[in-house]
Image (tube, helix red, strand yellow):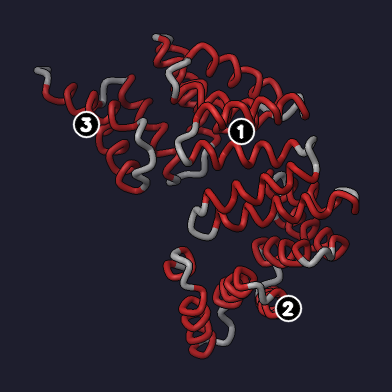
Amino acid sequence: MTKQAKGDLDGAIADYTRAIELEGTNYIAYNNRGMAKQAKGDLDGAILDLTKAIELKPDYAPNYINRGFVKQTKFDFDGAIVDFNKANELKPGDNNIQNMLWFAKDESTKSRPVLFLRRGMAKKDAGSDWDGAIAEYNKAIELKPDFAEAYFSRGYAKKEKGDLGGAIVDYTKAIELKPDFARAYNNRGWCEFLKNDFDSAVNDANRAIQLNSTNRSFYDTRGWARYEKGDVVGALDDCNRAVGLSQVGTWAAVETQGLVNFINGDYHMAFEQWNNTFQHDTNKQYLLPFIEKAKAKQALPR
């Protein structure tokens, strides 16, 4: 999906079409071409491709998620709900699917704000267009000032742009509007961690965990903040919990395992895990001091 990620939608569609010509049962190619068409505004063409993907692979949740997203963009909320419910059957307990269901079930009077929110998410996903995403979230908030999800999403975009203060303001507003918004507490806590406000980070992560004790990210946030506060035992416990809740082999798990290894004195492995994670995503600038610490520890005599 390199061309699609870079915004070359026509090139991506051409590549997916060639893949389909070579293998007519390639449901991934139909799925990807459908989403490329959606990004170009060809919603009907997108639905045709995604419907074909479902015919070829009816037990693949992303096919239904993507078709539901396109239907929602077309204001076909009933159709979107059907697709999201099917995806939820295939992947029960998935937070993203449940959020999509929540959006689709929202009252019809709220449909335009939801559309702008989804457009913002689409711009975020299609090449990390953070400015474009924020513009869409602004429209959603203008139409619906009590839209907690829009403040949450705008906070995420601001964080990715490096505006930690602005992100914290948006996450705080989301929490004010939706006091049980666990992800907003966690994300605000992570921004506080990046601003070296470790006490606040721990407090927010604590609240997130109280609201949802099965999300790996919440333990991850608290573990890193506890480590910086000098609570090594608490940090190790949180990181082990986060790793245990992670999908094996993901970069998130590798990054957190790096802190576990660092605490346990395996500085070489910690360095390798953090360095590889950073090479994969150079936006993780907060890892650089830890990489240097691990490098320095390796140089010390045993």
Percent of width and height locating residue 167: 56, 32
Q: Are marks 2 and 3 in contact (CB under 8 Å)?
A: no
Q: Residues within 10 Å of mark 2 (few under 14, many from 20)?
A: some
Three-letter code for the amino acid on which mark 3 is drawn: His
**Res 147 quadrant in image:** top right
Question: Distance of mark 3 from mark 1, alpha carbons?
Answer: 28 Å
Q: Is residue 224 above or below residue 37?
A: above
N-term-proximal mark, 2 vs 3: 2
Mark 2 or mark 3: which is in front?
2
Q: From the viewer's perspective, tell me whether residue 199 is left or right of residue 59.
A: left
Question: Distance of mark 1 from mark 2, alpha carbons?
Answer: 36 Å
The C terminus is located in which quarter? top left
Three-letter code for the amino acid on which mark 2 is drawn: Asp
In-front residue for pair 97/286: 286
Q: Which label belongs to residue 215? A: 1
The residue indicated by pointer 3 is: 268
Which residue does the image show at 23% across and 23% down from the upper left? 293
Which residue does the image show at 51% across and 54% down from the upper left? 129
Q: Secondary structure at mark 2?
A: helix
Percent of width and height locating residue 138: 67, 44
**Res 48 quadrant in image:** bottom right
Q: From the viewer's perspective, tell me whether residue 264 is left or right of residue 98.
A: left
Three-letter code for the amino acid on which mark 1 is drawn: Asn
Which residue does the image show at 55% across and 76% down from the upper left? 29
N-term-proximal mark, 1 vs 2: 2
In-front residue for pair 89/146: 146
Which residue does the image show at 34% across and 48% down from the upper left? 280
Q: Is residue 289 above or below residue 14?
A: above
N-term-proximal mark, 3 vs 1: 1
Q: Secondary structure at mark 3?
A: helix
The residue indicated by pointer 2 is: 44
